[in-house]
């Protein structure tokens, strides 16, 4: 691995101009956390300067639909090794040639940036994160974090030693239903959670033209691409860590996926809560929101919730209902979140860079290792047919995710 190049801009004193606050808003018998952000317009605010690395299909979606809606950041450079993709970026976004680079080192040498946004394929994450941290830059990286737990632990140690923010964009955390569900569980609104049932159903069989794209080429296209979000939400909502996993993955009839796009998982958490999870990219059943349909069985009733009905466009898919035993179901009014999903993930990162403090639901690198371990335990179980103790994954340095 090449030694990360130092950036001539390292050591610049951080700007502390973005004012943030957290307020608690009481709503329908529960407390919900609301992030109160300064408005860029008319305020003396300098946005966090970022370089985006990786402009494939998903990275370009970030560039076109997410970043322009986040006033807390300013893009000062784009990195993409494919020259045709880089030219497409220039034409679609009007990017200046002196802001477009074939590699991260070139960008670090030519532009003044505070942070790096990595939306490249997962196989490139570890080297890119290391180079960015080595250059003194904060990092926001798309999920999955990296390919192995060993890499993840090494990188979070490097970030800690360098006093830099390293965050994973687990954007499903930034939806009002998920935040509300986590609060209800933490406050034991219906008592302790004993069991959780989660269903995810979509139909996304690819066409021949899409065969090489992302999810279709993954070793485990459900577990690696989408279930990582659900695994991460399990940890966030329950406030528990997984201890044991059993997973079966399969190819539904008529599947065009190279690898299994459907799976069923049973997970036992450290406080005894049992989670059953079923997901499929090839289900003919009624579509669920991308966040899935959740049913939490509690000591005194149940909590039902869903989130992310579409791709970070609206909050139409966000709903939370509580049903106390023997009583009618009560829908919970959710907090207003003008910024949500990837937009709020990026804004949260920018605020953490400016203030040095992350909000409770930010998925910092060290915490995200727990979600990465859970995902890899599910993959190991699906591959071997065995029940996998989660801690065993930490002693398997050779286990890797297949790069996209």
Image (cartoon, grey):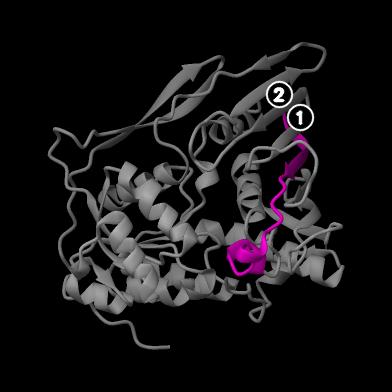
Q: Is residue 372 visible?
A: yes
Q: Is residue 276 magenta?
A: no
Contact, mark 2 vs mark 1 (Cβ under 8 Å): yes
Q: Is residue 398 above or below residue 62?
A: below
Query: Dividing the picture into quarters, in which one does residue 138 lie?
Result: bottom left
- In depth, the one of 244 and 114 nearer the eye is 114
Q: Relative to residue 155, is residue 385 drawn left or right?
A: right
Q: Residues within 10 Å of mark 2 (few under 14, many from 20)?
A: many
**Quadrant hosting residue 160:** bottom left
Q: Position of residue 281 (x, y in %)?
A: 72, 52
Residue in the image at 61% along x and 45% along y: 233
Q: Nearer the viewer, residue 129 or 57?
A: 57
Residue found at x 34% / y 87%? 3
* Disc 2/disc 1 C-alpha distance (Å): 6 Å
Residue 208 among those drawn in magenta: yes
Q: Which residue is mark 1?
A: 298
Q: Residues within 10 Å of mark 1 (few under 14, many from 20)?
A: many
Does dot 1 land on a helix, a strand or a loop?
strand
Location of residue 82 by image quarter: bottom left
In the image, taking residue 200 as reference, residue 13 lies left or right, namely left
Note whether 18 is above or below 176 in the view shown. Answer: below
Quadrant in which the C terminus is drawn: bottom right
Residue 51 vertical placement versus 39 (above, below):
below
Q: Earlier in the sequence, mark 2 or mark 1?
A: 2
Residue 100 lies left or right of residue 270; in this view the side is: left
Q: Quadrant of the N terminus?
A: bottom left
Q: Residue 130 in the image: state x and y as whole percent.
A: 40, 75
Residue at 60%, 19% (x, y): give it: 332
Q: Which mark is residue 353?
A: none
Instruction: Report the residue marked by disc 2.
Output: 190
- Bounds of the magenta span? 190-217
Q: Residue furthest top?
A: 327
């Amino acid at each position: 691995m090449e030694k990360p190049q130092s950036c001539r801009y390292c050591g610049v004193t951080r700007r502390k101009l973005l004012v943030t606050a957290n307020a608690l808003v009481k709503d329908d018998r529960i407390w919900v956390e609301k992030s109160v952000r300064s408005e860029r317009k008319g305020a003396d605010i300098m946005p966090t300067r970022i370089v985006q690395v990786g402009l494939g299909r998903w990275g370009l979606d970030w560039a076109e639909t997410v970043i322009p809606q986040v006033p807390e950041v300013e893009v000062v450079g784009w990195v993409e090794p494919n020259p045709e993709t880089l030219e497409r970026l220039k034409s679609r976004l009007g990017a200046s040639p002196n802001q477009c680079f074939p590699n991260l080192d070139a960008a670090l040498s030519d532009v003044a940036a505070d942070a790096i946004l990595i939306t490249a394929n997962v196989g490139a994450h570890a080297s890119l994160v290391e180079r960015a941290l080595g250059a003194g830059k904060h990092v926001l990286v798309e999920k999955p974090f990296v390919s192995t737990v060993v890499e993840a632990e090494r990188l979070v140690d490097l970030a800690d030693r360098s006093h830099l923010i390293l965050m994973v964009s687990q954007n499903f955390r930034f939806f009002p239903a998920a935040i509300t569900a986590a609060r209800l569980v933490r406050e034991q609104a219906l008592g302790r959670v004993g069991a959780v049932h989660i269903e995810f159903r979509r139909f996304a069989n690819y066409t021949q033209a899409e065969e090489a794209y992302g999810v279709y080429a993954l070793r485990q296209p459900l577990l690696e691409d989408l279930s990582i979000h659900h695994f991460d939400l399990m940890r966030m909502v329950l406030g528990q860590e997984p201890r044991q996993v059993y997973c079966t993955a399969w190819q539904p009839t008529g599947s065009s996926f190279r690898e299994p796009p459907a799976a069923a998982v049973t997970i036992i958490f450290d406080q005894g809560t049992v989670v059953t999870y079923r997901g499929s990219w090839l289900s003919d059943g009624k579509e669920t929101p991308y966040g899935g349909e959740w049913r939490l069985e509690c000591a005194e009733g149940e909590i039902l919730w869903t989130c992310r009905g579409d791709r970070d466009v609206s909050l139409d898919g966000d709903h939370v209902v509580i049903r106390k035993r023997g009583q009618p179901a009560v829908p919970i009014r959710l907090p207003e979140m003008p910024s949500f999903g990837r937009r709020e993930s990026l804004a949260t990162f920018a605020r953490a860079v400016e203030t040095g403090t992350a909000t409770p639901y930010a998925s910092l690198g060290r915490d995200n290792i727990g979600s990465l371990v859970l995902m890899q335990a599910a993959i190991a179980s699906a591959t071997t047919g065995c029940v996998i103790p989660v801690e065993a994954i930490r002693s398997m340095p050779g286990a890797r995710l297949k790069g996209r």
